[in-house]
């Protein structure tokens, strides 16, 4: 068994090293087989070469996000320690935001929460560092953007507290800084906009920042929640290791379900985890949805990507919530019905949906491709080559533009951002969906009621319980009626004998 595992990783490592580097170009086009949409590359930003597309700030671009109005988008350059803002229409660079700091203290920083202590670097809060921006989340009103750092640069193995920047979206400036747990990768905003979840890949924990106050300086951390067991980190202080492996569940994808009762956290090294947000506790796992990388909610479905197998999964939101409601309290391993999946390209990473939710766009890393999936049929309807090796992706709120970031690998590729224009055969459908989403504070439908009951073997058992109670009620009525009947008959008999 051990030999097979070693052989697998050896072959996989060799395959990665031998993968050819792909470069796409402006004008590249994808036309879906059903003719419903066309995706065309209209611009690029490269951290290599020369010419109009060259941008020195693009260095290992990890993720991208459009602002709610769609007029600009951001790209996080992980190794460059920068977040770059561009105009969507002209692709003109607006500003570059640097993540370099003299220390982790000062008027810009929230007071330490006491939840995240420096144990390997005593006094680490006073050390200068560059933050490595990973993902981002933008508030629904487009006012703030939250950017977590993979690590502070002096912490070579990401085992002590990292940090998170709060950016003023209008000014494109960092206005607030705060601590996080080790190696945060994903951040997600609650539907109410009052809570930010910060998922720590590094030690199986999820942090929470209460952002309900209008004054950001009054925001505060809540106690972090552990998924399974909190990892005890104790790595070298002089030699770096691969922290993307051996990190427990490798928690990543993070999404609040409508109603904010539940929070889903995917584990690239384990099952999908479920957190009860109201009780602030981890309640269990979904083993059938293991090794998921990215998770989104769109319409009435939850969609997930699995990097290891190059697949996209879907499950009806109602089915998942109701199944958890029936089973919680009796088990920590939830069984979810209605799961579907489809094979896409190797290394399925970030996925996003069009405004209508009809189409899913998936960045596939090892296959260096962009895939399009019909979400209703769960089938691939098109794909195209993009710069090696894509990881991040976002679609503009109106569904017209798509940005894909290619981070690259040690053997080359990457350092590229590709911008696409999407044309739909039925643009009115996407436009109408985008308009509705823009008008509604919470475009998702209401979350089904969650009931803490033990799951029965079948729906028929629930129905039979109802019938039993009805029968008991009728029997009670008959008994009471019989008692009263006997009483009145006896009374009439006594009266007649007197």
Image (cartoon, rainbow, N blue to C red):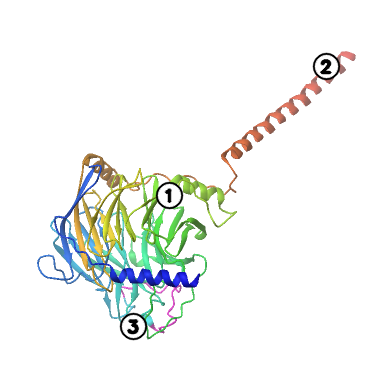
Query: What SS does tag 3 mark?
Result: loop
Query: What SS does tag 1 mark?
Result: loop
- Quarter-wise, where is residue 102 in the image? bottom left
Say whether residue 107 is left or right of residue 447: left
Residue 86: x, y in percent?
Answer: 18, 61
Residue 275: x, y in percent?
Answer: 48, 58
Query: What SS does tag 2 mark?
Result: helix
Question: Magenta region: which residues?
Answer: 107-123
Q: Which residue is mark 3?
A: 127
Q: Which residue is mark 2?
A: 492
The one of 398 and 40 positioned closer to us in this rendering? 40
Mark 1 or 2 closer to N-term?
1
Q: Is residue 223 magenta?
A: no
Residue 307: x, y in percent?
Answer: 37, 61
Label the magenta part by its dominant secondary structure: loop
Pick out the residue farthest to the top: 496
Contact? badges 3 and 2 (CB < 8 Å): no
The one of 395 and 35 positioned closer to us in this rendering? 35
Pick out the residue farthest to the left: 51
Q: Residues within 10 Å of mark 3 (few under 14, many from 20)?
A: some
What separation in Å lies between label 1 and label 3 (alpha carbons)?
40 Å
Q: Which residue is mark 1?
A: 259
């Amino acid at each position: 068994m051990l030999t097979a595992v070693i052989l697998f990783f050896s072959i996989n490592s060799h395959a990665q090293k031998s993968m050819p580097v792909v470069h796409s170009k402006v004008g590249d086009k994808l036309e879906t087989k059903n003719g419903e949409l066309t995706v065309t590359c209209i611009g690029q930003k490269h951290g290599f070469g020369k010419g109009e597309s060259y941008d020195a700030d693009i260095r290992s671009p990890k993720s991208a996000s459009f602002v709610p109005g769609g007029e600009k988008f951001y790209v996080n350059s992980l190794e460059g320690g920068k977040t770059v803002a561009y105009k969507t229409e002209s692709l003109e660079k607006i500003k570059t935001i640097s993540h370099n700091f003299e220390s982790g203290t000062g008027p810009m920083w929230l007071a330490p929460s006491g939840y995240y202590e420096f144990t390997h670097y005593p006094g680490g809060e006073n050390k200068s560092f560059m933050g490595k921006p990973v993902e981002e989340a933008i508030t629904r009103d487009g006012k703030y953007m939250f950017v977590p750092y993979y690590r502070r640069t002096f912490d070579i193995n990401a085992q002590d507290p990292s940090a998170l920047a709060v950016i003023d979206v209008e000014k494109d400036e960092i206005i607030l800084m705060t601590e996080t747990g080790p190696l945060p990768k994903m951040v997600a905003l609650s539907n109410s906009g009052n809570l930010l979840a910060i998922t720590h890949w590094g030690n199986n924990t999820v942090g929470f920042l209460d952002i309900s106050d209008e004054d950001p300086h009054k925001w505060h951390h809540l106690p972090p929640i552990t998924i399974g067991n909190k990892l005890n980190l104790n790595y070298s202080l002089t030699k770096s290791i691969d922290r993307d492996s051996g990190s427990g569940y490798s928690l990543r994808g993070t999404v609040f379900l409508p109603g904010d009762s539940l929070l889903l956290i995917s584990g690239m090294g384990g099952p999908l985890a479920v957190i009860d947000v109201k009780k602030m506790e981890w309640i269990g796992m979904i083993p059938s949805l293991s090794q998921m990388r990215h998770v989104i909610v769109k319409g009435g479905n939850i969609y997930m990507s699995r990097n290891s197998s190059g697949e996209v999964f879907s499950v009806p939101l109602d089915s998942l919530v109701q199944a958890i409601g029936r089973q919680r309290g009796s088990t920590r391993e939830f069984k979810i019905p209605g799961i579907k999946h489809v094979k896409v390209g190797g290394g399925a990473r970030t996925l996003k949906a069009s405004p209508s939710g009809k189409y899913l766009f998936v960045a596939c890393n090892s296959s260096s491709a962009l895939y399009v999936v019909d979400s209703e049929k769960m089938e691939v309807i098109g794909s195209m080559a993009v710069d090696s090796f894509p990881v991040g992706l976002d679609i503009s709120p109106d569904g017209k533009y798509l940005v894909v970031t290619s981070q690259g690998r040690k053997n080359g590729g990457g350092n590229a951002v590709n911008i696409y224009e999407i044309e739909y055969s039925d643009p009115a459908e996407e436009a109408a969906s985008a308009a509705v989403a823009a008008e509604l504070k919470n475009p998702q439908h209401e979350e089904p009621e969650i009931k803490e009951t033990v799951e029965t073997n079948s729906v028929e058992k629930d129905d039979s319980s109802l019938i039993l109670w009805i029968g008991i009620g009728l029997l009670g009525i008959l008994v009471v009626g019989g008692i009263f009947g006997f009483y009145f008959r006896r009374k009439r008999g006594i009266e007649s004998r007197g």
